Amino acid sequence: VLFPYAAKHARSFLSSTWGSPATQAVLRELLTQAQADAASDSSGPGGPAQLLEARADPVALDESLLTALDLYIQRCIAFDRKLGPLKTLQGLVWRRGYESGELRGQVFGDVPGVLRALRSQGVHCSLYSSGSKQAQRLLFAHSTHGDLTPLFDSYFDTRVGPKTEASSYADIALCLGSVRGPEEVLFVTDAVAEAAAARAAGMQTLLSIRPGNTPLAAQMQAFGSTAEFPTISSFEDIEAIMSLDK
C-alpha cells in the first residue's frame, strides 16, 4: 500500500511543494544521483540523461523537468533502488497522506494488546524495518488502532545494516544494551532469511505466519535452507511462549 501510494502521488507532491526547502533538497540529491547514474545507464524513458537534459533551472517549477523527474523516480522505484533521496521523498509523501487521513497504518488486532502487556512486564519493544525510522514512526503514530508509538523504545532501519546479515542484528543487540548479549533479544519476522541472520547473530527468533505472507515452504526453498524456526500466527502466541520460558 505505502510504496504504490508514494509512486502515485510523487508528482503532485513535488508540484505543490516545489519551493519548499525539503523538496529542493530532495531535488538536488536526485539530480546528483542522476549524474552518477548517467555514466552507466542513460537510455530509455525515465533514464538519467532525460532528467539531466530537462534541468534548465531546478529552482523554478518547469513541467518538462517535473515530468522527467517523475519518470526517473518511477524508474528507480520499479528497479527497487535503495536511494537516500528517494526514501526521503517517500517519507514526505507518506507524512502528507497520514496527516490528511488518507493513509492509515495497518496493524493486526492482536498486536497492540500484547505490546502493552509486554511493556507492563518490563519488556523493551523495538522495531527493525527496511523502511526508514521516520516511516516506521508515521505508520504506528497513525495506525488503525491509534497512536502506538509510546509502545516502542527504539527504531532501527537499514542504516544499521541489511536485514539479511548477522552483523546487523549483533549491532542492534549492542545498541539495545543487552547485558548478556544477543541471546536476550527475541526477533519476530515474517522472512526466513531475516530469521536466519538473527539466529546467526545469537538472537532468539520467531517466524510470524500471517495472511498474505509468502508461504513458508516457498521461502525455505528460495533461501535454500532446511533449518527449522518456531512459528506463531498471532502475537498472543509470544506471551504463551514467554510464560513457558519463565
Image (cartoon, helix red, strand yellow):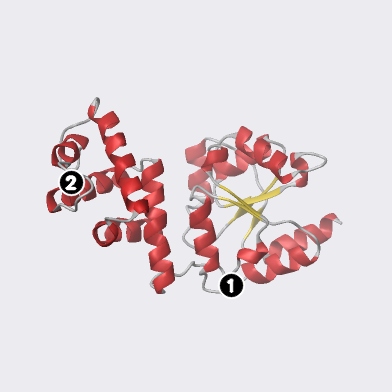
Q: Tag 2: residue type?
A: Ala
The front one of 175 and 77 is 175
Is 181 displayed left or right of 82 in the figure? Answer: right
The front one of 232 and 51 is 51
Q: Residue at x 43, y 68 (%)?
A: 98
Residue 109 has which mark? 1
Q: Disc 1 on helix, strand or loop?
A: loop
Which circle's residue, 1 or 2, is located before the other in the chain? 2
Is 32 displayed left or right of 194 in the figure? Answer: left
| Residue 189, horizontal then vertical, whole percent | 59, 51
Q: Residue at x 57, y 43 (%)?
A: 194
Q: Residue at x 15, y 39 (%)?
A: 50
Residue on which disc 2 sits: 68
Give the answer, above or below, for where 149 lies relative to 57. below
Is 208 displayed left or right of 36 in the figure? Answer: right
Q: Disc 2 on helix, strand or loop?
A: helix
| Residue 188, horizontal then vertical, whole percent | 63, 52
Give the answer, above or below, for where 204 lies relative to 108. above
- Is residue 234 at all visible to an observer of this figure? no
Furthest toward the top, the residue is 39
Label 2 Cα crowd, 10 Å radius (few <14 / some 14-19 / many 20+)? many
Q: Tag 1: residue type?
A: Gly
Quadrant where the image shows the N terminus: bottom left
Give the mark count.
2
Of badges 1 and 2, nearer the viewer stands 2
Q: Residue at x 72, y 37 (%)?
A: 202
Quadrant where the image shows the C terminus: bottom right
Give the image quarter of residue 121.
bottom right
| Residue 154, horizontal then vertical, whole percent | 65, 53
